[in-house]
Structures are given as structure tokens and as C-alpha cells.
Amino acid sequence: MTETGNPPAAEDKASAPVIPFVSGARPAGEGGHFEEFCAHPAYFLMRAYRECGELAEFDMGGINTVLMVGPQAHEAVFRADDINVSAREAYQFMVPIFGKGIQYGAPIDIERQQLRMHSRGLASERMNHYAPVIAKETREWIANWGDSGEMDFYEGFADLTIKTSTHCLLGSEFRYSLTEEFASLYHTLGAAADAGGLQDPNAQKSAYHARDLARARLEELITERVTLRRAGGEVHPDLLQIYMDATYADGKHLSTSEIAGMIVWFMFAGHHTSANTAAWVLVELARNPELANEVVAEIDATMAASADGFDMKTLRRMALTEGFIRETLRVHPPLNTLTRRVVEDFHYKGHIIPRGKNVMLCPYVAHRLEEQFPHAEQFDPHRPNPDNPFALIPFGGGQRKCVGNAFAMLQVKVIFAILLSEYEFELAGPPGTYAEIMPSLILRPSDPCILRYRKRR
Ligand code: HEM
């Protein structure tokens, strides 16, 4: 589809300006830019932007991809018809992970109904119910920390957020049945989602065999829990209940296999992204002690004035804490390759991106544009939101915007309200050791991510 909705004339194609091609590619057939891309997608895309500007074409080892940078370009992609500039076509490699009949493995009208089911369980009005559960899990997490110590907080937050999100969204019986096996199966699934999937979703790799076994076993474990809940007959106020009770437009309920797929889908989308965000928030607090003091003062004052603990009214008063999390998401956005397959020639400012190529947006690059974020390299939680809503895109935008963003913000905010009420933190290594790495499609702090904690006096 075109930016204006007009079909392209043949002469337009001939006269359309050429999109610059990023230097340093291996010859076609020998991988193009794929190796450099995989080494660190965000850094490669930053280099592409610096060299070529708003539009930069590169070769993802067989599939040419156009990086589009800046609020106008983001808006054009987010507002494009989802069928013609297609997430579904770009992310087909996720189908074996979530399962057939789920998201991009289902017909588009079914996928839209499934998304609405997620949205119902993650809507803002549900948050009052989830906040105390997150607080309880966080208190239990720190109960045995003692006066001081050291911890790998990347691992620590991955462990905590799997407990908070399963407890809130799937219920206490699911949460307390979490086993090492569940975590390890889930880890195996995650290892299969890398940039190779964007290049060729059908490639056969050894990781894919392990992925399929892990997916099947996870489904067995989830099915056990769902069957037990059905037998118990109780109704719970969570997302699992929504999946169990929901019906499609034709009146059919989700099968147990579909429920398992929905759970894997939202955990996949929400778990590492939230755990990463929490780890970076902690690193930035420790790197910026003066700002950390301001955040702690806000949390102390808000909690002291609140009789009800963690209701949404209280949490909304923590504006600086929220600004700190948003600034962390600006500087360290976890998801950095928002990709779409061009199914119908896509027109943008006179350029034509022909069908068959991919377009890609990169929050990491977008959030470092000086015009939108003056002194972009400076960490500033007081920074106002940019005027253009398509400038700051850690949660994506348009029809495919993250449905879990309110839950993610709530989760990180409650975790830090408790942690900072009880403990203070400092880096255990030199600041440079907390580097940004991107071993899969998620930007994360390098491991181990060790920080020291000490009980507040
Ligand atoms: C800080 C944490 C999070 C970040 C940075 C994040 C980021 C994103 C982004 C950028 C997208 C759009 C991807 C694209 O356009 O290609 C997305 C989609 C999605 N997110 Fe999140 N997310 C977070 C947490 C969550 C949580 C906690 C959940 C669920 C509990 C969740 C569920 C989803 C789902 C289901 C989609 C797919 C929407 C669709 O396909 O239309 N996310 N997320």
C-alpha cells in the first residue's frame, strides 16, 4: 500500500529516488550484512543510520531490509495497512514457538480476537488487582537478603518477574507449581528466537528441534494446570480465566492447546522485556546516585502518605519514578528490531520500497535522535515526553502497539517502590562493565550484572 493510498504508476518507480545502501556488505549470496547485524543489531542499525540517514537499505543475508528512522517514518509504518506492511509475514518464525492456531499461525481475524482477549486481562482497570500481588512477591524475594550482599540482578529480576507475572496473570496455583523444568523449557524456547528467524523462518537448526520438544512439554504442563482449575470450578480474576471463558465470534471456546499458546505468547512478549527493564533501572539508579536520592525521596513521601498500600492512586503520584523507568526504556529499549514484510509496494516520501523486502524500525536509534531528545546521551528522568507520539517507541505503536505496556510499567514501578524503601544499591564493578549486549533480538545488560545492596538505615 502507498503512503497516500494511490496505486504506483510505472514511471513513478523509475523516477523514485534510490535508497542508500549501507557499506561493508559481503557479496550477495555470501551473507551481505547478516554477520555484522547479528553481532549487535542495535549498533549495526546505528551505524546504518549515521551513514545513510532516514532510510538505509541493507542485506540481511538474502532478504533486503530498509531501516526507517524518525517519527515520520515510524508513523508511516505504524499507520500502514497491517496486511500490506505485515508483521505476520515478517515474524512467521514465531509460529512454532507459540503454536499453530495462535497469533501469526492463525487466520488474521482469529489473531485479532486473540489480541482482544490479551487486552482484556491487561487493561488498566485490572491493575488495582495486580499491584498488591507484585508487592507481595517482591517482599518475599527480599525477605532473606539480610543487611547486605551482592547479586546478579539480571538473573534475579528474570526469576522475580516470572513469579510476579504468573501469579498476577495465571493465578496462585499456577505460580506455586512453577518448577525448574518450566523455567528451563521456557529458556529453550527463547534460545530459538534469534535474528536467523527474520532471515529464514524455515531454516532447520538443532535449536529448532529442542524448541519443538520444549513447546510440546510446556503444553503438557500448562494443560495439567488448566484441567485442575476447571475441575476446581472456582472463578479467578486473571488472564487465564479470561482465556478459559472467552469465546470466538462463532461461539467456540479456545482449546487447551490454544490456551497454552496464548500463555507462551504473552510470557514470551512480556517476561524478558520486563526483567531487562528492571535490571537497567537498577544499573541507572546506581550510576546516578543523586537522581536515585530524588526517586527514593518521592517513594518515601508517597508511601508515607498512603494508607492503602499499592493502589493505582498511590502509584500515579510517583511521577519521577515513572519518569525514571521511561527514561530507562528510552536509553535501553529491550526490543529493537520491529520488522514488517512489505507485501504491496510501500511508498514513503517519494521512495518506493518494493514488495518482498522488509522494513525495520529501531527504538535504540530512534531514541538517540538529537532533534527529538536534546542531549540524547544524557540520562535525564525529568526529560519531558517529546511532542510527537511516534518519537518515543519502546512499546511500538499503531495497531501492533504492546498490549502489556500498562502491566509492564506497573510491575517495574511496584518492584522499585519496595526495593528502594528497604535497600540502597551500588555497582559492584566499574561502570563500563555494565555493557549493552544483544545476543538475541533483545537488548540486555552484559552478564553477570552484579550489584551490591545494603539495608537502609
Ligand atoms: C518493558 C516491557 C515491554 C516492552 C519494552 C515491550 C515492547 C513491545 C513492543 C515494541 C511490541 C511491538 C512489536 C512490534 O511492533 O513488532 C510489543 C508487542 C507485544 N507485547 Fe510487549 N513489551 C513489554 C512488556 C509486555 C508485557 C508485560 C506483555 C504481556 C503481559 C506484553 C505483551 C505483548 C504482546 C502480546 C505483543 C504483541 C502485540 C501484537 O502482536 O499486536 N509486552 N511489546
Image (cartoon, rainbow, N blue to C red):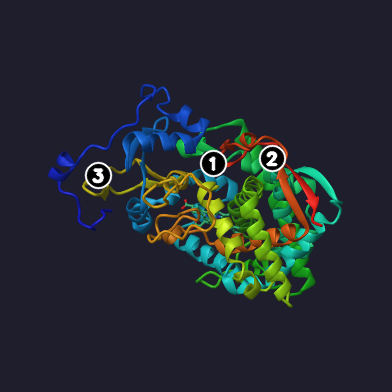
Q: Which mark is residue 421?
A: none
In the image, residue 435 lies at what x, y percent? Answer: 60, 36
Q: Residues within 10 Å of mark 2 (few under 14, many from 20)?
A: many
The mark that comes first in sequence, 3 or 1, is 3
Whole-Å distance between the Cαs marked 3 and 1? 27 Å
Element assignment for label 3: strand
Element assignment for label 1: loop
Residue kind at label 2, given as amino acid type = Cys
Callout 1–callout 2 Cβ contact below 8 Å: no
Q: Is residue 385 left or right of residue 241?
A: left
Disc 2: which residue: 449
Whether residue 134 is visible: yes
Disc 1: which residue: 441
> Where on the picture, by quarter, is residue 174?
bottom right
In the image, residue 80 lies at what x, y percent? Answer: 34, 56
Q: Is residue 82 left or right of residue 175?
A: left
Q: Is residue 323 above or below residue 29?
A: below
Residue kind at label 1, given as amino acid type = Leu
The mark that comes first in sequence, 2 or 3, is 3
Q: Is residue 243 left or right of residue 47?
A: right
* Tag nearer the camera, 1 or 2: 2
> Where on the picture, by quarter, is residue 155?
top right
Disc 3: which residue: 352
Q: Residue furthest front?
A: 290
**Residue at image location 61% in from the left, 51% down from the top:** 277
Of 216 and 365, which appears nearest the observer? 365
Q: Is residue 151 above or below residue 162?
A: above
Q: Is residue 180 above or below residue 173?
A: above
Quadrant into which the C terminus falls: bottom right
**Residue at image location 74% in from the left, 47% down from the top:** 156
Element assignment for label 2: loop
